[in-house]
Image: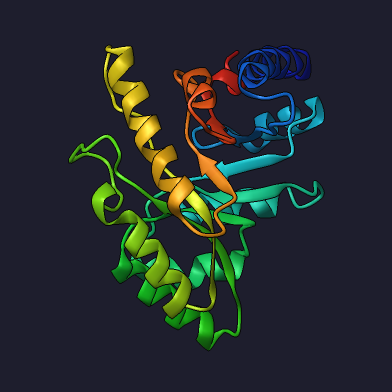
Amino acid sequence: MLNKQKAIQNLDEIIKKVEFARLQVSQHKIVQIVGVSKYNTSDDVANVYKAGQRAFGENKVQELKQKQEELDEYPIAWHFIGTLQKNKINNLIDLNPILMHSLDSLELAEELDKKLKIKNKTMNCLLQINSAFEDTKSGVDPKDAVEIYKIIQEKYTNINLKGVMSIGTHSDNKEDIIESFRLTKKIFDQCAGAEICSMGMSGDFELAILNGSNMIRIGSGLFKI
C-alpha cells in the first residue's frame, strides 16, 4: 500500500519536474496534473489526495463509479480517461465526470449527445486524436481533427468541447514522440475556443509540456511505492 509520506514524496517529484519544464516554455503557463488512479486502491488515492493531488482519472466506468462511492468524503475532481463503450454512455453521464478525455469519433459524439439531451445534461469533453498513427490507439485521424472538432461544436450542443487529447508515440526515439506532440499542439491551435491540450504520461510528460501540453495524466509516477 502507498503510504502518505511516499505519496507526498512522489507528488513533490512530479511537481518539480513539471515546474522545470513549464518554466522553459512560459512563466505564465499552467499545467494541470490528473492522477491516473486505475490499478490503484481507494486507500492509495486517498493518500495521494491528502498529499495535495485533487484530480484523478479512471479508464473504466464501473471503476469510476466504485471509486466515487468509496471516496465520496473527498471533493475529488473525477475525470474519465478510457475508451467509452456505447452501452456505458448512460452510466457515465450519471457519474458527472468533470472532464471526459476520450471522445474518439463523430459516431460516439452523436450517441453521447443524444443521450445527454434525453437526460437534459451536458458534458465537458476532449477530442482524442491519434497523432501517433498507431492502430493500437483510439482517436480521430489528425488530418480530419479540426473539421471534426468544428462539427461537434456546431452540431452536438450538449457536448462542451474543451480541447484535445492524444497519447504520445510508443517509441524509443525521442524525436518520434516529440513529433506526435507537436502535431497535436498544431491541431489544438487551430480548434476555435480550445483551452486544454492534454498530452503526456509518466514516461513522457516533460517532453509533452515542452511541446505545448497544459494537462498531463500521471499514473505510475504518483502511485509508485
In which quadrant is the N terminus drawn?
Answer: top right
Colour scheme shown = rainbow
At a point 47% along the width and 71% down the height, the residue shown is 153
Residue 189 visible, this orientation? yes
Q: Provide residue 196's location: percent of width, then percent of height.
A: 57, 46
In front here: 118 or 90? 118
User: In this picture, is 53 found above or below 56?
Assistant: above
Q: Provide residue 132's location: percent of width, then percent of height.
A: 27, 34
Q: Provide residue 112's location: percent of width, then percent of height.
A: 43, 73
In front here: 171 or 60? 171
In front here: 195 or 88? 195
Residue 141 visible, this orientation? no
User: In this picture, is 225 found above or below 148?
Assistant: above
At a point 56% along the width and 52% down the height, the residue shown is 64
User: In this picture, is 81 found above or below 32?
Assistant: below
- Tell me where residue 2 sits by quadrant: top right
Q: Is residue 141 left or right of 65 when viewed as pictured? A: left
- Tell me where residue 54 sits by quadrant: top right
At a point 38% along the width and 71% down the height, the residue shown is 151
Q: Provide residue 18's location: percent of width, then percent of height.
A: 64, 20
User: In this picture, is 207 found above or below 28?
Assistant: above
Residue that sits furthest to the left in the current view? 135
In which quadrant is the C terminus drawn?
Answer: top right
In front here: 44 or 27? 27
At a point 63% along the width and 64% down the height, the residue shown is 96
Residue that sits furthest to the bottom in the current view? 118
